[in-house]
Image (spheres, rainbow, N blue to C red):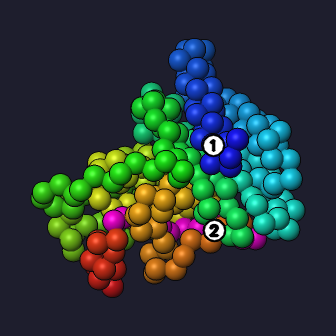
């Protein structure tokens, strides 16, 4: 199994586990979210350690250690991105599995289990052509950042509220939106897999200032992100300025 195939299979399987937990009806609210996080994380860690025992892992749901900083290959995972949406029975949540090599988002898979999809860097979808009308900007459905509102106003963009970071990034790949701009604070596990899949599909994925996305750093905070077609980059940067 290649690294990319492994990422996709782990994402798919973890998503199936999360769906089974939710559909059991045995838990709800915070208990459901806690169970989903814990069980999916345990499965992902065990699977990656079994298949790639020499690699390090950085997971949102595990205690971080400096040991990963000594490794070139680091799996960066979010077992359940969008816990609120998961608990509310929505479809806009995701599982992120990425492999960073020498600090770059080398490959990844983003599962959207409630939509029956796994988007992967080794077989990225063809990004649909932009639709007629105003550009569409994916934003948080609960707390869109001020920068996104400012850019949307400057571009005359339509705001499209959506749940998890992975769901928003993949919406750009699937033609459900044009721009995903985030400035409200994220961590490496929030965007490594989405960035890897987006880059493989030919989309632009950087920090807001144009700096490349770098991973496996001592501080895993990676607070801002821009994913969009290359043709929109200068318009967004002009709006930010």
Indicate left or right for 147 with 67 as reference.
left
Q: Main secondary structure of the magenta part?
A: loop
Give the vertical position of 27 relative to 171 (above or below): above
Q: Of tags 2 and 1, which is closer to the observer?
A: 1
**Which range of residues does the magenta coloring cover?**
217-229
Give the vertical position of 19 relative to 82 (above or below): above
Percent coordinates x, y for residue 126 in the rendering: 35, 51
Question: In the image, is residue 61 part of the stretch drawn in magenta?
Answer: no
Name, please, the residue furthest toward the left: 133
Can residue 88 be seen in this snapshot?
A: no
Residue for point 65% across, 37% down: 10
What label sits on residue 104 in the rendered view?
Answer: 2
Crowding near pointer 2: few (<14 within 10 Å), some, many (20+)?
A: some
Residue for point 63% across, 53% down: 98
Quadrant where the C terminus is found in the figure:
bottom left
Question: In the depicted view, which residue is nearer to us: 128 or 194?
Answer: 128
Residue under label 1: 5
């Amino acid at each position: 199994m290649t690294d990319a195939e492994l990422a996709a299979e782990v994402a798919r399987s973890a998503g199936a586990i999360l769906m089974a937990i939710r559909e059991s009806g045995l838990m709800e609210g915070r208990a459901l979210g806690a169970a989903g996080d814990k069980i999916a994380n345990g499965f992902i860690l065990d699977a990656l350690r079994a298949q790639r025992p020499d690699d390090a892992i950085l997971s949102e749901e595990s205690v971080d250690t400096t040991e990963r900083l000594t490794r070139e290959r680091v799996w960066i995972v979010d077992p359940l991105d969008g816990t609120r949406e998961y608990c509310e029975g929505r479809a806009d949540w995701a599982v992120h599995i990425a492999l960073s090599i020498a600090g770059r988002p080398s490959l990844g898979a983003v599962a959207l289990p409630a939509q029956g999809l796994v988007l992967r860097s080794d077989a990225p979808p063809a990004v649909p052509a932009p639709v007629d009308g105003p550009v569409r900007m994916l934003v948080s459905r609960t707390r869109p950042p001020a920068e996104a509102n400012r850019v949307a106003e400057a571009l005359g963009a339509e705001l499209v509220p959506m749940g998890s970071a992975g769901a928003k990034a993949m919406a750009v790949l699937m033609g459900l939106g044009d721009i995903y701009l985030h400035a409200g604070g994220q961590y490496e596990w929030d965007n490594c897999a989405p960035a890897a899949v987006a880059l493989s599909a030919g989309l632009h994925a950087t920090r807001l200032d144009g700096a490349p996305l770098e991973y496996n750093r001592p501080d895993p905070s990676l607070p801002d992100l821009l994913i969009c077609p290359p043709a929109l980059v200068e318009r967004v940067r002009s709006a930010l300025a």
